[in-house]
Structures are given as C-alpha cells and as structure tokens.
Amino acid sequence: MAGSVDRLDNFGMAAWACSDDRKRPCRIRLDVEGIPTYVYIPSDFRPDLARDKWADGFCSVDINFPKIIGLQESVRVDVWNEDTGELLSRGTTVLRPAVDLSSKYRFEKPKSAASASPISAEYKDETWVIQGRAVYPSHSQLVPELLHGITGTLSFEQQEPEAEIGTSSDLVVRKFVLRARAKTPGDYLIFRIAPREFDGKRSAFAGFVAVPPALSDLGASPAYENMSRVSGAGVNSEMFVAAGLTTAAKLDGVARTFAGKSLGQFKCILDWGAGVGRVAKHVHNYFAPNVEFWCIDVDQVNIDEAKKFVPRAICSPIPYYPPTHLEAGKFDLIYGISVFTHLSECAQEVWLQELKRISRRDALLVMSANTEFAALHFASQNGSCIRDLLLLGISDHLLDGNLGNKLDRTTYYRSTYHLTEYIRREWGKHFEILDIVPRADVHVQDLVVMRRL
C-alpha cells in the first residue's frame, strides 16, 4: 500500500502517501466521523522512504492540527490517500476524549456555579442599563436580586446562548441585560445574578455584578492608553469602572466567606499587579477606606498613573522578579487579579515565595487563574495549551500581545492556563488552598483562595 499513518492522536498526525508508481507524493485527507476535515500535501523528507524509493523520500507530513480533534468526546478518524482513494495503513482510529487522557495532572471537567461579569454599564434616563455575560447550567433560568444599594425596579433579559462555546454541554455562556430604575443612585449597587434554583453556597459571590453610584465616578477613569494596557483594546470608561467595582465586591464576598470579616476589617491590603488601579480604586473607596493600602506592578507607566487614580493608596513599581522592597510579614490580605494568568511557571514559583515572605501568618490571599473552563472556552484559539495542560498541568508558552509588547521585557507577559490539580499541588507547597471557586471573576477566571500558614 502506498502510504501509512505512523502517529495519530487528538493533537496531530505523522503519515505518508505516494502514487502507486512511487514517483510523486499524494494528498492525505483526514475524515472525522465520516466528514472530510483536513487535506494535507506531503512534502517532508524521510530517509527510510527515500531508501525504499518512495518519491525520493519527500512524501510525508508531521503536523499539529489547527484544532484539537475529539476534545471532549470519542470520535472515529479515517486517513485516506485522496489521490488513489485508498485508506492508509493504520488509517482508522477511534480517539478517546482529549480531556480524559491520562497525564501527570488530572483534567477536571468544569463545575456548575454562579458566574457573571459586566461588559458595559450606562446610566440614562434615570435607569442603569447593565449588559454582561454569565455562565450557568444550560437548563437554568437566571434571576436578578438587588443585594446592596437603593431599592429600585429591576427588569431582566436573558439572551440566547452564545455560539462560541468550547465547554461541556451542561454549561453555556449567556449574555444578559439588567435594567435598574434609580432616580438618584446615591450609593453603589450590587446585584446577584444566579439560577432560579440557586442554593446560596459560598461561591454565590461569583454571580455578583456591581455599578458605581454616579456618573462622576465614570468620569474619573484613567486615560484610554492606561485602561487598554489593563483590559485590552476596545475598553471604555463604563466597562472599566463597572468591571473593577464588580471584582471589588466579589473580593469583599470572598473575605466575608473565608476570613469571616469584611475588607474594611483587615489591617494592611496589597493589590499585587494593580495596573492602573482598576480594582484597587473601588476596594479602597467603598470597602476598605480606612485600611493601609498598597498597589504594586511591574508596569511603570500604569503604576505612575495609579498614583493619580488611587491617590490615597501607596503605589510603587516592583521588578519583574523578586525580591521586592516590601517588608516581610506586612500584609494580612493580598489579592492578584489576572496576574498568575500572565506569568511563566518559573516566574510563578519565585513570586509564590515572595508572596509568602511579605504576608502575615494566617493572611488571606486571593488569586485569579485561567483553569479548565477557560482552557476549553478558548481552545479554538489556543488549542496547543490543552496538550501542555495534559502533560504538564500548566501552559505558559503563549505570549500575550496586549501588554507584553509594551514592556521592555517582551517575553515576560504570557497567556497562562492551569489545571486545578496543578494549583492544589504546586501552590499548595507554599499556602493552604482553601478553595478554588469556579469562574468567580470576569466570567471565565477562577478565584484561588489561600491562607498563609
């Protein structure tokens, strides 16, 4: 037979195909569940094929698929010599789900839990109009509830599920529109958007959505250049402020749940990787106004702007790698939002040691992370991360083009994903892992809650 499959898995294939007269390479077609999916023109050289006089050896391919095959379900794959119409030797394979493959770390299927995040907020005609995304079990009906602020009239629209979902069939990403009638807001508002059958467990704060008390807060947002360094292109003042306040409200919920006290009852709080102060402004203004508050970041441009945006905080630049100038045992609460999501494994290890050094005994640490849900959600864009996760428990090789190319160390800033088991095992060497709350921030990131022993 003029061709064979030497390796075929969920991530790639090595194969060769040639004409019966051994003079020219033939196209290789891959069918998934009987549907033609990929066609490759072999041109790689293999000395063993050259020795046997198959097209001078230039009739093989060794490729990675652009998208993982059989990500969450078993599939039948057939590989053909398309020019001759023959099924290649060893060309039929049933692939197990990629996420079920055995590896050093276990890939856990995403769990059902309350999740919500605003994507825009506008106050118009005495009404707040908040649009956002939520992640819930597909059978659930979402219900809004006002938790803090003035009593207003609520109306709620649950949109159709978004199409670009790489998660399990039990979970869907839904857009929503929430309208809150409020003639004079006067105070910040916090809503919970949760399934009708919501049971009030400790992950409830993941469904929080918050908006500021007045448009004057929106006008105090940083310049677009600074906001985009934190949140990417396309960000606006309304989204920036609403998302920052929402995360601050969730952090207060974490503190009350796991430490038994509000943010305002801590003595010294650190925003590690504060950027321009997107979250810090609201933590310090609304939840912990009388607490000693620090903002640190490797981005000198934004930390300089944070001094204006969060004027009562102590804002300081830090090096890309420890040590820092911070005092040992200083902080009893440290949070890092979208920091471990951008660090290499080596950088994470030294920063975990530094966070332990500067935190007090029994301090609470809250860090966001892209875990299984985020990896599946973005698998069509960053499919190669799944392979790394299965083999290593972490994927840190993808560079992030948002802030990364604006830093003087252009390879420092990554798009990093973790498996939850990896976090428990590796981060657990430094801290007690209290919980990993699914999708508690920005509707895709988990919040890792830890205690300094």
Image (spheres, helix red, strand yellow):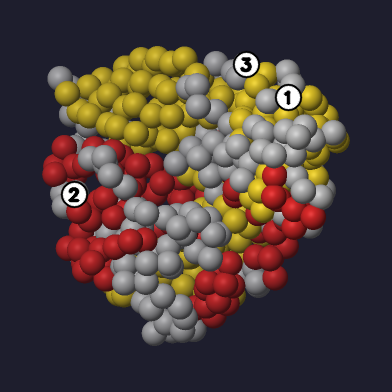
Q: Quadrant of residue 181?
A: top left
Q: Amino acid at mark 2?
A: Tyr
Task: Please identify the quadrant where the C terminus is shown.
Answer: bottom right
Q: Position of residue 63 (x, y in %)?
A: 64, 46
In primary-sequence order, the first of circles 2 and 3 is 3
Query: Label 3 is placed on what type of residue?
Result: His
Where does label 3 land, which residue? 139
Q: Is residue 276 above or below residue 303?
A: above
The Cα atoms of the two marked residues, 2 and 1, are separated by: 58 Å
Q: Residue at 23% across / 67% down in the picture? A: 301
Residue type (three-letter) at the residue carrying disc 1:
Thr
Question: What residue did someone put label 1 on?
Answer: 84
Q: Earlier in the sequence, mark 1 or mark 3?
A: 1
Q: CA distance from mark 2 to mark 3?
A: 39 Å
Which mark is on residue 224? 2
Q: Along the horizontal axis of the image, is 144 left or right of 403? A: right
Q: Residue at x 61, y 65 (%)?
A: 451
Element class at badge 3 = loop
Image quarter in which the N terminus is found: top right
Residue contact at pointers 2 and 3, CB within 8 angstroms: no
Above/below status of 403 relative to 87: below
Expressed as whole percent of the image width and height from the top left, the position of residue 336 reads 46, 60
